[in-house]
Amino acid sequence: MTALRILAAGPGVTLQDGGRHGYLRFGVTAAGPMDRLAFATANAAAGAKRNATAIEVSLGGLELAADAAVSLAVAGGAFRIELAGRPLPSAAVATLEPGQKLAIRPGDAGAWCYVAVAGRIDVPNMLGSTATHTRSGLGGISGRALAAGDVLPFAEPRTIEPKLATLDAHWLARAGTTIRVVLGPQDDYFTKAAIAAFLAGPWTLSARSDRMAYLLEGERLAHAKGFNIVSDGIAFGAIQVPGDGQPVVLMADRQPTGGYPKIANVIGADLGKIAQLRPGTQISFAAVTIEEAVAARRAEALALERPIPREPLMRTEFPSEFLLGLNLVDGVIADDAADEGA
Amino acid sequence: MTVPYPRYLDAGEAALVVEFGETADPAVNAQVRALDEAILSLTLEGVRETVPTYRSLMIHYDPLLLARKNLVAAIEQIEAAHPKPREPKALWMLPCCYAPEFAEDLFRIAELTKLKPERVVALHSGATYRVYMYGFAPGFCYLGGVPDALKISRREKVRPPHPANAVLLGGGLTLVSTFAMPTGWYVIGRTPERMFAPTRAPIFLVEIGDALKFEPVDAATFAALDARAAAGEIVAKRKPLR
């Protein structure tokens, strides 16, 4: 068995698959990726199953190496990717030769980045999933975040052609800081003025945010009917407002039930967008209808229905200006563009 | 103000909350469980999973496979038949040690209820509970059916972490915990049983709707049972009711 070796991992780097589904009714958190679209993009680019186990890289960054030649796909926020010291685009296929190092560090934007593998990261399923939930100690490696020295057993490693490529995953470039929500289920616990204030913001994403919850700071929201409700279910993106009037967006590691009124829920198509925002970012919300939310979800699902366009990156020590002068790269791009049009 | 129930509330476009009331009332919870059982038996394409809580059912669904209006129509059809939840399949006898070192808050509960500690234990272990819901953490089990004399509020302030498998009381409920954590409930005892054991079959000991009683055991018995439970054995007794 070959392996991926973790050389360095900042806090909050975990293994995630599509999530631990079917056990919410037993109090089990689903976990899974913070940015589901970026996760699915990385897996698709690596030729892996849609919900295959991948590494979710936090702002803490990651360095890894492989024992055998293997291709990886990276997608997510605008992270800085380096293969054996060579910079790569933030959405790319990279093929590691044994001993080469892939380094991923936070770049200009984005909070999460996914490393998917051509092959299979072979860690045990717990309740049908490898998704790491550190609070209950389930999934991944012993239910914890990855750390330097970890060895991830790796089955069926493959390399894919082209060995180095940039991915055109333009759907991951989500512009703006307005997050669409569907109001409810407990918007009747708030006055009209409070709902308007909630939507308008601005809210500042707190540095205390994590995989469980994104905490928002801004003008205190007033409750109309108190802030205790009898606990009920919590969906991904639920925005609950506890007694301090500061909204909390419940994310991938949320508990399945809770007892604060939920003023709104982030729509599925904007979950990845809010997940990728960094602490300190100012955001506002826009209320949409269920129909609009479903249409946005449908549009998002289309992104991965076709193969992800990719352009080979020439494997050379020559500077890119020199290559451009030779017209080599142009030719390659033209071929690739012709394929796309076909 | 009277609200017509059930209410259909959206938690985004991929989860529907069907609410039967505002309070944790046994009759309301029975409606939740009845709908949960009925919707699961339909195996509707697009229904991903359901989460029964005291007074509502959350249905997680894929709106690209199942339109909201079709989901609501299916629920209305179920509700038109006034379904009743199944009778409990089983009565679980769960060992519980009420010795002072395991029941850290027993004297405080006695003060609050103006009962002798022995009376608190007799009442708590004499009642038959129903499993209302899980929540909070894997296997963390919420039981309804607490005798009126033991219905005390939750703590005003969260207490330091209780040990794993602590049995808790407060807010009109009794609970069986699975992980050590700070809590707003009172610790009334501890069970050697594991309500959640990811490498055991079954992983979760009891089903929502099951009946459960606590069987008092002394500290020595607790230690023996705890060792057996740690080795993967189920030490609670299950009596089939049907």
Image: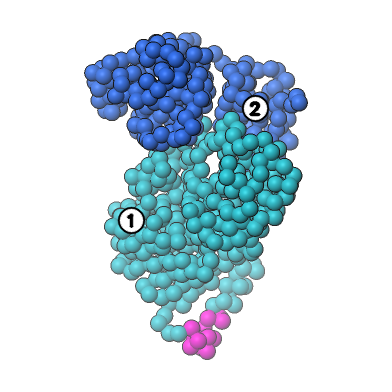
Q: In which quarter of the image is residue A137?
A: top left
Residue B102 horizontal/vertical position (percent) = 32, 24
Q: Mark 1 lies on which chain?
A: A
Q: Which chain carries label 2?
A: B
Visible in this render: residue A207?
A: yes
Residue A195 horizontal/vertical position (percent) = 71, 47
Which chain did the renderer colour blue? B
On residue B172, the disc is none
Q: Is residue A321 on the magenta stretch?
A: yes
Name the residue rendered at 58%, 18% in the picture.
B26
Pointer 2: what residue?
B22
Does dot 1 land on a helix, a strand or a loop?
Answer: loop
Name the residue rendered at 34%, 14% in the picture.
B216
Pointer 1: what residue?
A147
Q: What residue type is labelled 2?
A: Glu
Q: What is the chief secondary structure element of the magenta stretch? A: helix
Residue A310 horizontal/vertical position (percent) = 54, 68
Which residues lie in the magenta part? A320-331
Measured in 3D between alpha carbons, the distance from the residue under mark 1 to the one under mark 2, in whole angstroms, is: 45 Å
